[in-house]
Image: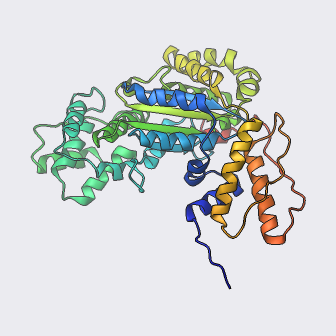
């Protein structure tokens, strides 16, 4: 007689992610975390509820669960009523360039009950009859930034509800695209009867406009009935490969985002930012490259005192980041029980035997341990034997400078 088993699709998705060493929301939901200090700190930030940016940093070695933790915190933020966005620093996304970073944040933003992402989709959830929208419009109309663009475009968005093409152009402008021109906006204002109530000036500089978009976007999320926007920034250690001037810009942006020295444009933003960096960044870059001592002086000479303060705040946030707790024998045993159950749910015709658990060392990563278990079970499931398992992990933070990673010098 042939036996059939009910496949648990979510469990299979979780195992596939863990097998590849890249967490997804299914793995995060199944495994949870033992990083209680970071979770408690984050929940306190979310519960504070004050306007203006605030944030925290976490640090850990490769494979210790930084990305896993960020995904779990994203789930917690959504459960607490926040819109969320997650970005990963890369060659295409330099941390020190707000004009590229902030549109990417707004492109990834999503509400807790949304599958789609992006500020234009969130804007479609605005309820023009709700008190939250009235308060949002009043704020935009009185905001001292934007030369009237924010209240004017918001008024058009409310008035021209059936003009889908224009509404899309407005929402894409909010999210960072150059989809509107001043002559067109003035024309739309006149044609819709709003010309006497709203006037627009020249657009602000690209950098200021980017920061304004982040505040406007975070408040738009709040206007849909949510508490604001939580942004997660992963792999910040990539800035170790920037030139010194590029690192200065990155530290400054980090200081602005985390609330150490916020930009004036961010003062009204219901914004929380969480960053993740490797554990050795402080020693390898802040001290090893002399950034902690030399960078503030260079920033002051080149960009002024206020930006130098933001740079110092960004470096301090990295140096004072919450260290992820190393795995203990107890936590590994609890993890083994969860992964064993998960594997059986994913492959119900297989009952995983207790695997070999490697001896824990200072360099042992959680990712490598889990992948070893899954590999052993896979080998037994396919071939009836575990074979010889060799696990290779990425080493320390690369610090060789590759200036093209950070954008153009000034």
Check the picture and name the quadrant holding the N terminus.
bottom right
Which residue is at a point 24% across and 35% down the rendered structure image?
Answer: 136
Q: Quadrant of the C terminus?
A: top right
Q: Position of residue 217 (x, y in %)?
A: 36, 40
- Quarter of the image holding residue 265? top left
Q: Is residue 300 left or right of residue 359?
A: left
Q: Residue at x 37, y 30 (%)?
A: 269
Q: Residue at x 71, y 38 (%)?
A: 331
Residue occupying the far bottom of the picture: 1
- Residue sitting nearer the eye, 117 or 362: 362
Whether residue 246 is visible: no
Left or right: 373 as drawn, with respect to 226: right
Number of callouts: 0
Q: Residue furthest right?
A: 388
Asked if one can make out residue 64 in the rendered structure from this viewpoint, the answer is yes
Where on the picture, by quarter, is residue 235?
Answer: top right
Q: Position of residue 64 (x, y in %)?
A: 71, 39
Q: In the picture provided, is 231 more to the left or to the right than 52?
A: right
Residue 400 higher or lower than 369, as above or below: above
| 304 vs 69, nearest the viewer | 69
Locate residue 402, reporting x and y percent.
71, 39
């Amino acid at each position: 007689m042939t036996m059939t088993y009910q496949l648990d699709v979510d469990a299979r998705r979780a195992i596939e992610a863990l097998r590849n060493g890249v967490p997804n929301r299914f793995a995060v939901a199944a495994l949870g975390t033992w990083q209680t200090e970071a979770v408690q700190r984050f929940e306190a930030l979310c519960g504070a509820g004050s306007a203006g940016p605030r944030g925290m940093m976490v640090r850990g070695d490769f494979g210790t669960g930084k990305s896993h933790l960020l995904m779990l915190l994203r789930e917690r933020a959504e459960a607490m009523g926040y819109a969320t966005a997650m970005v990963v620093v890369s060659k295409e996304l330099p941390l020190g360039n707000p004009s590229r970073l902030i549109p990417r944040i707004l492109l990834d933003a999503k509400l807790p009950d949304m599958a789609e992402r992006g500020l234009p989709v969130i804007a479609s959830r605005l309820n023009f009859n709700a008190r939250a929208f009235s308060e949002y419009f009043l704020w935009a109309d009185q905001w001292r930034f934007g030369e009237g663009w924010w209240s004017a475009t918001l008024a058009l968005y409310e008035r021209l509800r059936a003009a889908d093409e224009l509404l899309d152009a407005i929402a894409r402008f909010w999210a960072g695209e150059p989809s509107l021109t001043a002559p067109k906006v003035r024309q739309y204002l006149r044609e819709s009867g709003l010309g006497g109530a709203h006037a627009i000036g020249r657009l602000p500089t690209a950098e200021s406009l980017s920061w304004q978009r982040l505040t406007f976007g975070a408040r738009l999320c709040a206007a849909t009935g949510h508490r604001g926007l939580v942004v997660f920034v992963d792999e910040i250690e990539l800035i170790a490969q920037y030139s010194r001037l590029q690192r200065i810009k990155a530290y400054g942006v980090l200081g602005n985002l985390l609330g150490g020295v916020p930009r004036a444009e961010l003062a009204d933003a219901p914004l929380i930012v969480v960053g993740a960096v490797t554990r050795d960044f402080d020693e390898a870059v802040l001290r090893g490259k002399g950034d902690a001592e030399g960078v503030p002086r260079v920033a002051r000479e080149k960009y002024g005192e206020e930006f130098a303060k933001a740079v110092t705040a960004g470096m301090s946030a990295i140096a004072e980041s919450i260290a992820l707790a190393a795995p203990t024998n107890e936590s590994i045993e609890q993890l083994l029980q969860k992964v064993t159950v998960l594997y059986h749910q994913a492959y119900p015709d297989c009952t995983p035997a207790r695997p070999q658990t490697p001896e824990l060392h200072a360099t042992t990563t959680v990712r490598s341990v889990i992948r070893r278990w899954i590999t052993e079970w896979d080998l037994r499931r396919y071939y009836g034997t575990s074979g010889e398992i060799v696990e290779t992990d990425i080493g320390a933070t690369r610090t060789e400078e590759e200036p093209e990673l950070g954008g153009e010098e000034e």
